[in-house]
Every structure is written in structure tokens, then in C-alpha cells.
Image (cartoon, rainbow, N blue to C red):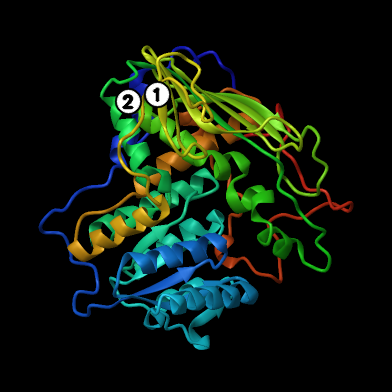
Amino acid sequence: MNHKNKTNETRRDFLKQSSLIAAGTVLTAASGIPRVHAAESNTIKMAIVGCGSRGRGATLQALNADPNLQLWAMADAFQDKTNASAIAVKTELEKKEESKKFDVPQERQFVGFDAYKKAMDTLNPGDVVLLATPPAFRPLHFAYAVEKNLNIFAEKPLAVDIPGLKSLRESNKKAVEKGLKVAVGLNNRHYFRTEETVKAIHDGKLGDLTSLWVYRMHPTHKIGDPGNQTPLEHQLRHIFNFNWTTGGFIVDALIHNLDICCWAIGQLPVSAQGQGGRLLRTAKDQMIDHAAVEYRFADGRRMMLFAQTIENTYADFESVLHGTKGSAVVGEGVGEPKMFADFNAQRHRKDNAFWTPTTPANNSYQTEHDRFFKAIRENQLWNELERGIDATFTPILGRMAMETGQWVTAEAAWNSTFEYVPDIANLSFNGPFPLVPDENGNYPQPIPGVTKI
């Protein structure tokens, strides 16, 4: 792949290659849509698929969002995770004197790679499933949830490769036809102060945006010795250290701030080039320790990504936006968005901000569930899936550019047929395994100039 067209990408190319930010916006209430929720009974049943820390948090937030929601079934690949989450959720509900919301006897606590089916099979059409497994499994589980006519909360990222995103898009067409409500775990989209800041940018508070900068730089993820674990179990217990489980560091860790920047500028990138990999890291996994990616939009404006996971180095976690009237800091890691009349926006700066949001702070994780369940109860059209696909595609494009060392267009990326686990529906602890270390315990790494998209 060459870069001869990198400066000639047109607005038409951009429109052709992306579903656009607007296509992923949530629709408001409308008449004539199927009433897909538990109207005949005031109680909605819910299943959680994926009982790790994020799944546990999403479960409690969902239960807080609706007074007549009942946790009915749980599923995970590992028994200890299902047990731990069941105890934690039940204990938390007991503290709030809401024990009636927990109705998950042992026979509805399912374990294994087919546990998602067993949990969803206990629900009725119009009930709710939370999908919080590693994102490699999201397209498979989403498709089954749609088949079962369930309302769906899907944690980010939505997939780890392009075939996964395409699968989700096809499944979502059926979800839309059925009137199912779909929420995506881009919680920063539901932070009131971020919403107000992006609206102010759209209203011209910063003038025209000229460039965007995304940072996530902090100490590394640790990983222990696998001991007697199989490669598959070891990988699933350390999902952030392997590419097939989460899509890699860029996809999992930078999705929020990349999404906020694209939201602010109102476009998706049409191409990217980048570099990165393992400079110092020797751990036996696939975790990168540095990356830099340049994204370009159709009109030539750029967004830069900087990632680093090296001990005792400079740390930063924010998004910085430059416009013709100044700069802003906003997004995950920031907390309090601010705008400045100069170009020295930074999250720790406390002086001379000319604009800050007036809306109160909120728990965005809770708000996304509050809005989701309100849509279910009031029969609003609510589908964030396309927005989630856009948000997931952007970091996948950046990862492809970094791994290949090439200038990668959005068109070429979207046409990729590479799958990390082509037969994930038949994955088993008995093998074959999707990723196997060599005789020294080392895992394959992308090679720029050799690796293909």
C-alpha cells in the first residue's frame, strides 16, 4: 500500500467510507414502533454475560436505573468469576435493602463458552441482557441477543476486527426492525459536562477546530506467569495484554477520547499512519509500550494519538482540541472540561479558562443506564450501535496503521477480511487455541513493513 493519495482524499470519499457521526445518534420517541419490553409485567428480567469487574459494575448501575428490574441469570467462561460477581451484587443489594432485585439461584449461574446462550434462554422477549465479555465475543453474543428479541447493553469496544464490526451492523439491522433498544458503553457520551462542551464547540465557542490531540500515557499492565493455565485461560484472565481479546491497547484504552474528538469535529478520519510496538517491554504477552498515530480527515485536518505504557515516564490522559479562538481540554481522564484563549490547554491547568461547563457533574456510567432503561419503559427509539461501530472503527484504523507501518485509508481498512478468531463460536478450553506462544513462551508480534491489514 502506498501513500500517493493521502493528501487528495475528498469529502465524497469520507461520506462513502463511514456511517458518519450523525448516523449513530440516538433517536427520540416515535409512534408506531414495536413495544419490545415487559409491558405485561412491571418487572423486567436481566441477564449479565461477562462477570468481570466491568460486568459487575454495569449490573449494579442497571439495577440502580430501574426500580422493577431483577437480575435473573449470570454467565461467564469461569466459575470463580460468576461466583464472585453473584456474591458482590447480592451483598450490595442487601446493603440497600433491595434483595428482591437478585433472583439468581445456582441453576441460573451458567459457566462456559456457551453460557451466554443458556443465560439468554431464560429471558423473555423484551427483557434485557448486558454484554460485558471481552469484545472479541461481542458480535457473537449480540447476534444471539437480537435473535432472542432482547434489549441490549453492549460494553465498548464492540469488536476487535472489521468482520466483527460488519457482523454487528448486519445484526443491528434486525434489531432496528424489531424495535429493540440498544445501548453502547461509551459512557463519556453521557457525561453532562462533556455533552455541554461538545455543544459549545459546535456552536463556535472555539471557532473552527484546527487539530486534535489524544493522550493516554501511564505505567504498564502487569502479567503473571501462566503456571498450569492453558494459553487460552491465561489470555482470558489477562485480556488487556492480548490483541485478540480486546483489539489491543489503542482499541481498548483510547476509544473514548478518539470518539469524543471525532464527535467534536463532526467527522471520522479517512486515513491514518503510525508507528509503535514494544520498545522496552519483555513480558510474555502482546502489550505495546508506545504508539503514535496521525489521523487525517477528509478536509486535511489532523488528529494525533500518543500512547505509552512505560514505567517512570511522563504520564498524561486527556484530549486537547485546538481551534481558531483557542483550545480546550475534554474527555476521559480530564473530569472538568475547560477552554482557554491560548493554545496551552491541559487538564491540570487551573488559571485563565474563559469557558467551563455550568452543568453539574454526574456519574456517566449510571446516566447511560438511566437513559437506556427510560427508553425501554417509555418505548423510545434508542439505538447507539452505529455510533459504537464508528467509535470502534477509529482505533482499529489506528492500530492497523501502527502495525503495518503503512498509510492506511478507511476504505482499505473497512475492506479487511482479517479475523483474530475466525471460528469463535466453537472456541473451547480443550483447544485448538486462537493464540499459542512459541517454545520460549513468547507471542507473535506485528512487524511493520511485513504485517498486512
Residue in front for this viewpoint, 196 or 153: 196
Amino acid type assigned to the residue bearing label 2 in the image: Ile
Task: Determine the residue positioned at 59% across, 50% down.
Answer: 246
User: Measured along the vertical axis of the image, is residue 91 above or below residue 415?
Assistant: below
Secondary element at image label 2:
helix
Secondary element at image label 1:
strand
Q: Quadrant of residue 98?
A: bottom left
Task: Determine the residue positioned at 47% across, 56% down.
Answer: 139
Residue in front for this viewpoint, 127 or 138: 127
- Name the residue that disc number 1 marks: 339
Residue 155 image offset from top left, x and y in percent: 46, 55
How many numbered discs?
A: 2
Q: Is residue 329 visible?
A: yes
Please indicate whether residue 214 sits to the left or right of residue 170 in the image.
right
Of labels 1 and 2, earlier in sequence is 2
Neighbours of disc 1 within 10 Å: few (<14), some (14-19), many (20+): many
As measured in the structure, the alpha-carbon distance from the residue carrying label 1 to the one carrying label 2 is: 10 Å
- Name the residue that disc number 2 marks: 201
Task: Determine the residue positioned at 36% across, 53% down.
Answer: 368
User: Measured along the vertical axis of the image, is residue 311 above or below residue 145?
Assistant: above
The quadrant of the picture occupied by the N terminus is: top right
